[in-house]
Image (cartoon, coloured by chain):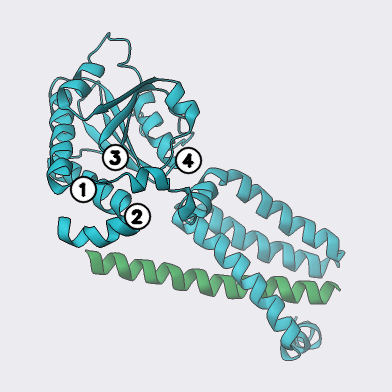
Chain colours: A green, B cyan
Amino acid sequence: MNERKTKSKVLLVMANVVISIVLSLVIFITFKTLL
Amino acid sequence: MLSFFTENILPIITNIGTNEFIVLGIFFLAILTLLNLLSKNNAFKITVVFVLYVILVSALAILLKLQTIEYLLLIVSFIICVVVMFSTEIKRNVWIRKNPKIVSTDVASAVRNTQQIVNKNINEIIKALQNMSKNDVGAILVLSNTKIPTSIIDSGVKIDSDISSALIESIFFPKTPLHDGAIIIQNDKIQAAGCFLPLSQETDLPKELGTRHRAGLGVTEVLNVTAIIVSEETGIISIAKGGKITRYADSEMLRKTLKEYYWQDLIGTTKEGKNNKGGLI
């Protein structure tokens, strides 16, 4: 049970990191294109 | 589409220098903080809407050749909306938990409980809760190791008494003047009774949870405290902590919560407590 909880927490953090990288790149590229 | 990518976007990616890398890092940290905050509060829908919104607005900004300030306004306005929607959660997650100074040192340093006294307090509280649960007497207890705002203490009656099941049961006995408020327990004392607590504005609460549960949940949303609630209708005991409520608490769960309060939350906040912790349990 605890192992599953830890696994899902790690997955959640990894998903957040990936989404953050994608979104920061999207915002950065948009800014650079618009400027 | 491909030519647009190779002509406009690819040069930007390939020409990322140190300055751009720092800016990217700042963007990354800001978005990661926001996403962590959202995921901690189970705001999955808002997270999806945020991701789609940023991608859609960015695509539109490039296609419609918006001005930078317009694009910036669109992104910032959405982030402000999220911050306003989750202001209570931000206060709880960022301010109360990350700031150890908020833990009252005078309360913490006053902790000189022996294992015997703590066990007696835990037993008295559990006995009172179980008796009230058996007799369908509504009750709400707030276990606090932080300074409770004076507005809450002043809304009730200061007691400053030792913890006893008879006293707790008497306070919550129906039709007595103090039965409709909360008891504030700090350390080994009942500080006040009949206190009014801030109500939770949560909309997803089950219908069977009334104002008492809402108050118990509300106080844990804004303060680093634990609330124990006994339902007047069903006698079910619930535990609220960090803006989350657990129902159907049995004596084991209550004992665990109270032990956590006395040994981790309370004594663990003082250096002396940390040293004593291993020996006392």
Going by the image, does B28 lie left or right of A13? right
The answer to whether B90 is drawn above or below residue B72 in the figure is above
Q: For the residue carrying disc 2, how many other residues have a C-alpha within 10 Å: few (<14), some (14-19), or many (20+)?
A: many
Residue identified by numbered label 2: B270
Q: Quadrant of residue B13?
A: bottom right
- Secondary element under disc 4, as helix, strand or loop, is helix
- N-terminal of the pair, mark 4 or mark 3, is 3
List x then y, in percent, for residue B226: 33, 41
Front: mark 4 or 1? 1
Residue identified by numbered label 4: B222
Residue identified by numbered label 1: B259
Residue identified by numbered label 3: B187
Front: mark 1 or 2? 2
Whether pointer 2 and pointer 3 mark residues with C-beta atoms closer than 8 Å, the reply is: no
The answer to whether A16 is drawn above or below residue B201 in the figure is below
Residue positioned 17% across, 23% down in the render: B132
Question: How far apart are the alpha carbons under marks 2 and 3?
Answer: 13 Å
Amino acid type, residue under disc 4 in the picture: Val
Question: How far apart are the alpha carbons under marks 4 and 3?
Answer: 20 Å
